[in-house]
Amino acid sequence: MTLDEFAGEFFQDVLAEADARGEFVEDVFFHKFCEHLMEAGELDAADRAAYQGRPGIGIRVDGYGGDPADDDSDTFSLLISDFHPSADVGRLIGSEMNAIFRRLSNFLRRALDRKWRDALEETSPAFGLADLLSKRWSGIGRVRLFLITNRELSERVDGREADELEGRTITYSVWDIGRLYRQATVGRGREEIDVDLAGSFGGPLPILPAQQPEADHESYLAIMPGSVLAAIYDRWGTRLLEQNVRVFLQHRGKVNKGIRATIENEPNMFFAYNNGITATAEEVEIDEDGGRLLLRRLKNFQIVNGGQTTASIHTARRGRVDVSQTFVQMKLSVVDPERANKLVPKISEFANSQNRVSAADFFANHPFHVRMESFSRRIHAPSQDGTFRQSKWFYERARGQYADGRGGLTKAQRKKFDLENPRRQLFTKTDLAKFVNVWEERPYEVSLGAQKNFAAFARRIGQQWKTAPNGFNEAWYREAIAKAIVFKATERLVTDQDWYQGGYRANIVAYAIAKMAHDVREMDRAVNFQDIWRLQALPPVMKSAMVAVAESAHDVLVNPAEGISNVTEWAKKQACWNRVSELPVEWPRPFLDYLISTDERRDAARTARREQRQLNGVEAQIAVVSAGPAFWSDALAWGSERGLLSPTELGVLGVAANPAGKPPTERQASRAVEALSKLKAEGYAGELSSGG
């Protein structure tokens, strides 16, 4: 895909989503662009807070990177948008860039002026942002100003020097459409991180080889000075953290006080106390000097475990703590780019660090996602409006799957693809987390933003999968789509209300649905999600109920608790949900009559679990037969040599490995697949085909 094609597709995506969701184009542009910035590690959150001064005043802001207090950070991020209403790639010249940044800088300075803040409407996003900025100012060491644009920055512009305001460093970063294109399409979805140790970080590091002669990748051990690690992190930030790890560290990886205490009080013991970092690179440059190996350069360096250690050392150094006597052990694996998507999550999963990411931490190839993707590709939604055409809801387990599905098709094939998989029915992992979590009565988590909400969702679903994977069946999938329908319909309903003045729509929707879920549960009733699935629309009796509860939720949101002025930050707090959950709501009688009993829902869930167990058996049987006797013979030999298999497991693998025998039964096939999983956990490298 070329830059022009990417820019045109991105522009059309923005227009289509704005139309489907009833939102302003500029709002959708902000959120879609910032999704990429969060994936790239530039931001932990991206909250919309649009303000534009009167013409001629030259003040503007479009959003911010969340409350730095949530992550024990000393950095405040402000964003300004430059949306060009065209699919063609426009050019952003230096003078325009400087003028845009000047407007954002003016907002920063005015926000610190109490008189100016007090003149703003108290319920406006601008007042909330300005108030938050002023309250956090004493603890801020750096302010990052971001310009996001769907134009391309002129090649003549080679950067913008940092400034200073009241002792704080002010840095500038431009994310134009070209940079977004590279981040979204090159490699594993991020720009290259080229760490030149010899040239930029104090010199090469002594390194020891640690791989076996027959190993299929290089492994090394090194001692990384804390000052070097902190300097590297200062340059690239959380882009160093492998994406799946970063998602979880954003949510729970605050600076560890124990690590900080060791750095300050016993730096000479840090190496002994700390587990170090586990890292990967796609390429390394190593020299030999008198029998010693020296690591000079790392291409696409990623820290897959030890992010908390790295961030803690970096924070200590920025706080002027001496880290010159702090040293960190580093285990480095050199991973070929073609194998990185498979190997890096495994390295991350099994590495041992302070903030260990376990199997429940839910990478994109977790069986839950694979199963949801499978459902979305084969389950047709009921047709609407009396037509005979059926469509699917396209679950994008990994970014770009939808575009890849359309790519390479003829015009006629693409038209057919679009009819079967309409863009309005495309949803991602973070969308799914949002649709489900509001019904779990967690609107405060949804309000944290896509990445942090997904992290919370992932841990819960990952644990549930361990104990009851059959609960995630076709009925669960259809119910999840019904929840998506409710969410999208509620967005439009809120936009159309007279009391809605713009802003905070995402929070209002999340709280309104969560309140409905709470009250329905309290009544020991249930929403008929299967009926919503059949209708593929929000039933009329639910519309009036949702409008009523949305207004009640809105009134609580725009009147925060004492001491809180920022509505967006108020929505992220459990206290806000406590207040909304206790609201008395007069639910319309037709809505109450529409609800079903919890017994009906439980019966349907039991039937669905039973059907999923049967389906699992059939799928296992297909996988075992497809793999072939030679595959199972190899697994059997490997497990037998190491004494890892029980008599039952030896028996079922023997059946699968017998080329002349009958195919295994569904039960035998399921046991064979379980035995294979056991062997893989012990180091066996065999993989079932994707069709299994």
Image (spheres, rainbow, N blue to C red):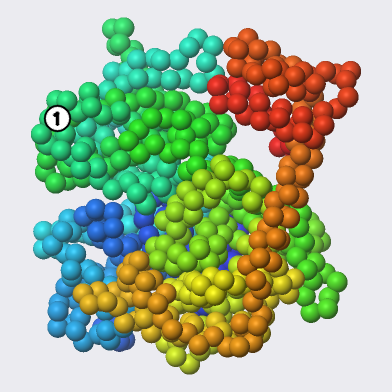
Does the image show residue 60? no
Crowd class of label 1 (few under 14; some 14 to 19; many from 20; radius 10 Å): many
Q: Residue at x 36, y 76 (%)?
A: 579
Secondary element type, mark 1: helix
Q: Position of residue 584 (x, y in %)?
A: 43, 84
Q: In the figure, residue 63 lies in which quadrant?
A: bottom left
Q: In the figure, residue 426 lies in which quadrant?
A: bottom right
| Relative to 149, 692 lies left or right | right
| Relative to 282, 394 lies left or right | right
Residue at the outermost bottom position: 498
Looking at the image, residue 3 lies above or below residue 539 = above
Q: Which residue is mark 1?
A: 267
Q: Position of residue 297 (x, y in %)?
A: 35, 28
Q: Residue at x 33, y 57 (%)?
A: 173
Q: How many marks?
A: 1
Q: Position of residue 419 (x, y in %)?
A: 76, 66
Q: Residue at x 51, y 32 (%)?
A: 346
Between 663 and 333, the one lying in front of the other is: 663
In the rendered structure, which amino acid carries the disc numbered 1? Pro
Q: Residue at x 70, y 51 (%)?
A: 609
Looking at the image, residue 457 lies above or below residue 391 = above
Q: Position of residue 658 (x, y in %)?
A: 83, 18
Which corner quadrant holds the C terminus? top right
Between 675 and 597, the one lying in front of the other is: 597
| Relative to 369, 71 lies left or right | left
Looking at the image, residue 175 lies above or below residue 389 = above
Does the image show residue 518? yes
